[in-house]
Amino acid sequence: MRLSGAVVLVTGASSGIGAALVRRLVRAGSHVVAAGRDADRLRRLAAETGADTLLSDLNRPNAGRDLAERALARHTRVDVLVNNAGVGWAGPFAGMADPLADQLLAVNLRAPIELTRALLPGMCHRGGHLVFVGSIAGRLGVGGEAVYAATKAGLDAFAQSLRMELAARPVGVTTLVPGVVDTDFFVRRGEPYRRRRPRPLPPDRVADAVAEAITRDRAEIYLPGWLRLPVAVRGVLPGTYRRLATRFG
Ligand SMILES: NC(=O)c1ccc[n+]([C@@H]2O[C@H](COP(=O)([O-])OP(=O)(O)OC[C@H]3O[C@@H](n4cnc5c(N)ncnc54)[C@H](OP(=O)(O)O)[C@@H]3O)[C@@H](O)[C@H]2O)c1
């Protein structure tokens, strides 16, 4: 679908991948609705790009539906929805407090489902595109990130199922499968990224990939592309994969 002139709602727009995507989409001529919680960051982004902004805490009940309604009230239509907002947590599952697990489920999985449910009917009439920002954690599982990985696996399955269901409709669906991206994500989750490899990708590169996915209706994008390899090994040789993953993390 054409980015120029499209109304695009981006969640998690106040930071990292979302903010980079807002800049990329505005450059492409989209009317961007940038949603997030951090009012100061959103104000600065709006001043820089001219994007419209909506404050929304997706951890609240019905927040996804409410955000969709407010976006439609302002722009009458949403052509592209980018479900990007996400929150992580790292540590042993046994030590994870219930409210934290609930927060990950609400922001990473429930809100995207609510937003999609509210915006999809209009897209089915006019055409549209849905983007889901997943994670390699959701494809492979990661020790110490069980709930995060589960929310991303759920998002992944939701997106892939929708792509099949909507095959005859004018609505594209993209799943993004990033590895490590250079954002505040790791600091916010309480554990910085300390490994030397894989090297974190710049968020601009992820934004370029999302823009291309929408334009060319790509079903899924791994970033970087070689992440397909461990997923393939796990599918074909699960025992070998487990041994390698246990050894190299
Ligand atoms: N960075 C990575 O290595 C990596 C890898 C794989 C996947 N991802 C995924 O990429 C997406 C973007 O993350 P990022 O790397 O750009 O991290 P980030 O810089 O921490 O950005 C996360 C965004 O999500 C928003 N968010 C968090 N909790 C929210 C809530 N309760 N309500 C509304 N918005 C909320 C934040 O908004 P506020 O700042 O306004 O609270 C922020 O805009 C996430 O879904 C993440 O899981 C990231």
Image: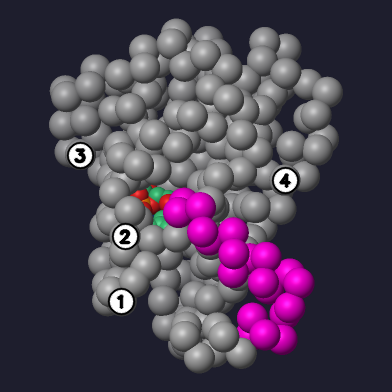
Classify mark 3: residues with Cα within 10 Å, few (<14), some (14-19) or many (20+).
some
Q: CA distance from mark 3 to mark 1?
A: 28 Å
Q: Which residue is mark 4?
A: 160
Q: Which residues are magenta?
A: 223-242
Q: CA distance from mark 3 to mark 4?
A: 32 Å
* Badge 3 residue CB within 8 Å of ligand 1: yes
Q: Is residue 105 visible?
A: no
Q: x%, y% of residue 2?
A: 52, 14
* Badge 2 residue CB within 8 Å of ligand 1: yes
Q: Which residue is mark 2?
A: 200
The tag earlier along the polypeptide, 3 or 1, is 3
| Left or right of residue 103, residue 27 in this image | left
The residue lying at 53 percent from left, 76 percent from top is 142
Q: Which residue is mark 3?
A: 41
Q: Please tell me whether residue 193 is drawn above or below residue 160 in the rendered image.
A: below
| Left or right of residue 87, residue 143 in this image | right
The tag earlier along the polypeptide, 3 or 4, is 3
* Magenta run includes residue 239: yes
Looking at the rendered image, the disc whose residue lies closer to the viewer, 4 or 2, is: 2
The tag earlier along the polypeptide, 4 or 2, is 4
The residue lying at 73 percent from left, 69 percent from top is 235
The tag earlier along the polypeptide, 4 or 1, is 4
Identify which residue, 188 or 216, lies in the foreground. 216
Which secondary structure lies at badge 4? helix
